[in-house]
């Protein structure tokens, strides 16, 4: 695809005035060839390969950003799910923690912001290695600063592994306790997914799927501020005009990502994978998905009509993206993380937005209940119930859903928690006090829906 100089020039206003950025260049790295029966050798192999494959990532990202004038906020790495890599050498959770520390050490040395793939895919059942990795997650998140963990507990094809869901409720609680001196920040690096994509460049859910090649470049583009800006001039316009404007804007944003991906691929000598066009907000004023929903006509997200407005936005973003690039993948759409979106925080403070309404919104957005602070005394069973609800939405609707909730130790509804950086801050939100433990404690798997049988 040839990208014109005019298109590059057109992005200048978007960058200067509308918070356009390339959110991440992510190198996906296969670590299958690093596995060994000896734990130390496995760790040594992992470190050596990451240092070799990703050694120029940060510099390349900075060079490209300087040349085209578009900020590239994060440089990241995703790896083969660590439960697979460590299956031959890890006999207890602490063995996996050694792999976690190796990954974090490599990320720090390389200067990347995050490394993802401390992961297990257990949508149907768990191997012993899967369970060991999952049980190691709280200690691993407490002992590292750049590592992200994810567990896929369901899919449209397999149903929902409720044993894994129950275990993840307990793991999130334990991670909160182990990092309670830092407002339970460990939970901000843990996400539980249904229908996880293999090529997602966004943390905390990124991992390098086993169907991928040895290494690949995936680029995640953001731009809610750009969409918000163009909608300011459309008050009273009909839905056709609104949709066409969003779609054309998404097209332009995706083309910027395509340029960055092409350049990064060429300079690093690594094949290009996908562009993920996701309207991922930041705490910066004017860089908010909630502000887009307001421009569409809502007083606050959470007002009647919110789910319809978000569905419209998500669909037009995807349509614009696929017109701009033949390789759109990952999640691609609108994110609604509470702590990372000032407009969402304002809606919570105003009483317009609840977890129940956010759950309804996740039926039509790109991910799920994301970066939501909840009371520290929320039971593990309730967290598992929240995970099960989101997994059911993903399973039935054949889409990716996720849960990243933070039960902040010692905090109650209405308190405020500071996470810092792109993670922002969050008001602690109310969770239903009614018990679901009798359901969560049932063993086994919720079957796949009838429409999953398409062979």
Image (cartoon, helix red, strand yellow):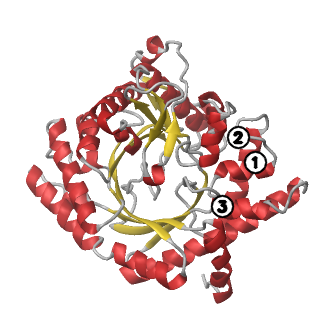
Q: Secondary structure at mark 2?
A: loop
User: Which residue is tagged 1?
Assistant: 294
Count residues near mark 3 (Cα–Cα under 10 Å), then give few for <14, some for 14-19, many for 20+. many
Residue at 62% in and 57% down: 287
Which quarter of the rendering shows the N terminus? bottom right
Task: Give the residue at the far front of this rendering.
Answer: 415
Pointer 3 or 2: first along the chain: 3
For mark 3, give the secondary structure. Answer: helix
Q: CA distance from mark 2 to mark 1?
A: 7 Å
Asked if residue 380 is positioned above or below residue 448 in the image, the reply reads above
Q: Is residue 92 above or below residue 229?
A: above
**Image location of residue 373, percent across then percent down:** 48, 34
Judging depth in this view, the residue of 95 and 5 nearest the camera is: 5
In which quarter of the view is residue 350 placed? Answer: top right
Identify the residue position indicated by label 2 in the image. Answer: 301
Badge 2 density bin: few <14, some 14–19, many ≥20, Cα 10 Å? many
Residue at the spot of label 3: 225
Do the numbered discs 2 and 1 sit on residues whose CB atoms are within 8 Å? yes
- Marks 3 and 1 in Cβ contact (< 8 Å): no
Q: Nearer the viewer, residue 444 or 281?
A: 281
Q: Nearer the viewer, residue 410 or 97?
A: 410
Specify few, some or many for label 1: CA neighbours under 10 Å numbering under 14, 14-19, or 20 or more: some
Vertical placement of residue 163 versus 126, above or below: above
Q: Residue at x 68, y 72 (%)?
A: 252
Question: In 3D space, how far apart are the residues under numbered discs 3 and 2 (Cα atoms)?
Answer: 16 Å
Mark closer to the chain start, 2 or 1:
1
Q: Is residue 233 left or right of residue 195?
A: right
Residue drawn at (62%, 28%) of the image: 356
């Amino acid at each position: 695809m040839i990208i014109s100089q005019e298109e590059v020039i057109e992005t200048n206003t978007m960058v200067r005035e509308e918070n356009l950025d390339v959110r991440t260049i992510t190198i996906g790295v296969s670590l299958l060839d690093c596995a060994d029966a000896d734990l130390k050798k496995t760790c040594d192999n992992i470190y050596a390969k990451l240092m070799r494959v990703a050694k120029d990532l940060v510099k390349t990202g900075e060079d490209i950003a300087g040349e085209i004038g578009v900020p590239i906020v994060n440089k990241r790495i995703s790896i083969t799910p660590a439960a697979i890599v460590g299956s031959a050498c890890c006999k207890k959770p602490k063995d996996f923690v050694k792999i976690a520390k190796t990954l974090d050490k490599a990320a720090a040395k390389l200067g990347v912001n995050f490394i993802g793939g401390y992961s297990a895919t257990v949508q149907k059942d768990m191997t012993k290695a899967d369970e060991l990795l999952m049980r190691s997650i709280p200690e691993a998140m407490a002992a590292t600063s750049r590592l992200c963990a994810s567990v896929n507990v369901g899919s449209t094809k397999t149903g929902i592994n409720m044993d894994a869901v129950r275990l993840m409720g307990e793991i999130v609680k334990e991670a909160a306790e182990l990092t309670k001196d830092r407002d339970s920040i460990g939970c901000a690096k843990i996400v539980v997914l249904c229908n996880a994509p293999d090529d997602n460049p966004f943390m905390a859910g990124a991992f390098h799927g086993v169907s991928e090649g040895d290494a690949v470049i995936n680029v995640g583009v953001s731009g809610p501020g750009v969409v918000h800006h163009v909608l300011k001039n459309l008050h009273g316009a009909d839905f056709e005009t609104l949709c066409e404007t969003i779609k054309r804007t998404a097209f332009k944003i995706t083309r910027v990502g395509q340029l960055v991906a092409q350049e990064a691929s060429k300079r690093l000598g690594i094949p290009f994978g996908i562009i993920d066009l996701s309207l991922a907000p930041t705490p910066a004023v004017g860089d908010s998905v909630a502000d887009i929903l307001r421009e569409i006509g809502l007083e606050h997200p959470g007002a009647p009509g919110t789910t319809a407005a978000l569905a419209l936005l998500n669909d037009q973003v995807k349509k614009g993206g696929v017109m701009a690039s033949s390789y759109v993948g990952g999640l691609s759409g609108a994110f609604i993380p509470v702590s990372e979106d000032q407009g969402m925080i304002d809606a919570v403070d105003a009483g317009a937005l609840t977890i129940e309404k956010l759950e309804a919104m996740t039926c039509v957005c790109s991910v799920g209940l994301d970066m939501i602070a909840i009371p520290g005394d929320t039971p593990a069973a309730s967290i598992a119930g929240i995970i099960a609800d989101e997994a059911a939405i993903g399973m039935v609707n054949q889409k990716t859903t996720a849960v990243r909730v933070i039960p902040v130790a010692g905090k109650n509804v209405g308190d405020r928690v500071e996470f810092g950086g792109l993670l922002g801050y969050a008001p602690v939100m109310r969770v239903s006090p009614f018990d679901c433990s009798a359901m969560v404690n049932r063993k086994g798997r919720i079957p796949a829906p009838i429409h999953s049988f398409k062979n």
